[in-house]
Amino acid sequence: MSSFEPDEAAHLGHPFDLYAGNANRELAEKIGRYLGMTLGRAEVFEFANENIFVKILDNVRGKDVYVVQPTCSPVNKSIMELLIMIDAFKRASAGRITAVVPFYAYGRSDKKDQPRVPITARLIADMLQVAGADRLLTMDLHQGQIQGFFSIPVDELTAVHLLSNYFRRKQLEDPVVVTDLGFAKRARAFAELLDAPLAVIEKRRVGNLDRAELLNVIGEVRGKRAIIVDDEIDTAGTLMEVVRALLREGVTEIYACATHGVLSDPAVDRIRQSAIREVVVTDTIPLPAAKRLSRIKTLSVAPLIGEAMRRIHQGESVGALFSSELQLVQEMSLWEEAGAPPNGSGRPHLGTEDDAEISPVAS
């Protein structure tokens, strides 16, 4: 007996449609290339009075629709575009609407840690559901508890395997993985994939400022090559505190990586002036040309998101991407930016042993 509900099962034998807002259209196009499909047609623009207008130009009645829109800068505009697009698809009688939100804004506001403050991450979840989303596909939420804010299915992907595979191929000698307590569980998986020890940074955020007061480095890092791992890099203020602490502890080299490269000002200047040899992020958030440095590398998550979408649509396991088929995820880092057409078996080509020297997608 099928494990899918009747309304989900009805979609499995039909093709799905892929649409994008304006927040990260390049990522949506890469996902389309991975899947061998083109983006659907939609008008999404802002009037002079800052009101957002959306018109779907295709017939989506009864279709399984995926809307790619990270809620990145400009954050509030990106959120409104997503909500209005979902409402447009709902009113156009789409069969199932999946909000593909690679970066979930307001994720840090996930609890009441001060008197009289909101839980904005929950508010965004409510808004997405009221707009008409039937499912959420996202990546590396700031805290896993945000999944519980939704009463619709949530698939949370992680870039830990892609990032760790990048560093595994660098073959760094004597590495140590460094993270804070909030990301320790996923960082432990990162460290295990590299067969490296884990050191934890104990920190305390100062008020509502974008910086943290470093308290302690727990673990042996002296004489090692440190890889700092986190879910996002915003202003890089905390990152610089960690770098200074590691230098005091006697590390020989410092690398950093994160799923989401928010890189708000003055992050790029801080990275440029720091002792970090390389910062690796993914393209869940677009990186403007003005923020591109030679030491900032960008890996594409398009194959991972595209494969998850294909599995969701066909009723296959998404969790298997990170367990029994771990090698599949690691090979996705070999995916070329130009994209590869399906190999005829229904699964896009992810590379062979002959492709082992291909570099990951980088900006």
Image: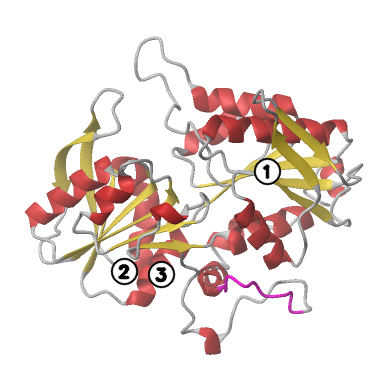
Task: Tell me the distance, in whole angstroms, between the alpha carbons under discs 3 and 2.
Answer: 14 Å
| Residue 360 is a magenta residue | no
Quarter of the view holding residue 135:
top right
Q: Could you tell which of marks 3 and 2 lies nearer the N-terminus? A: 3
Q: Nearer the viewer, residue 151 or 231?
A: 231
Q: Residue at x 58, y 43 (%)?
A: 70
Q: Is residue 318 visible?
A: no
Label drawn at residue 255: none
Left or right: 16, with 218 as reference point: right
Residue under label 3, please give it.
Answer: 166
Q: Along the line of sight, which residue is nearer the eye, 322 or 137?
A: 137
Which residue is tagged 2? 195
Q: Amino acid at mark 1?
A: Gly
Which residues are drawn in magenta? 335-343
Q: Residue at x 75, y 31 (%)?
A: 53
Residues packed near mark 3 inside 10 Å, few (<14), some (14 to 19) or many (20 plus): some
Q: 97 left or right of 121?
A: right
Place residue 143 in its image quadrant: top left
Please, what is the three-letter code of the amino acid marked with disc 3? Tyr
- On the rendered structure, is 248 left or right of 1? left
As helix, strand or loop, the secondary structure at mark 2 comes to: loop
Mark 3 to mark 1 CA distance (whole Å): 29 Å
Front residue of 341 and 98: 341
> Secondary structure beneath disc 1?
loop
Between marks 1 and 2, how big is the CA–CA gap?
40 Å
On the image, the x and y values in percent for residue 139 come to 53, 48
The numbered mark at residue 21 is: 1
**Left of 111 or right of it: where is 348?**
right
Compared to residue 303, the image places residue 119 above or below, namely above
Q: How is the image coloured?
A: secondary structure
Residue at horizontal 7 percent and vertical 52 percent from the top = 248
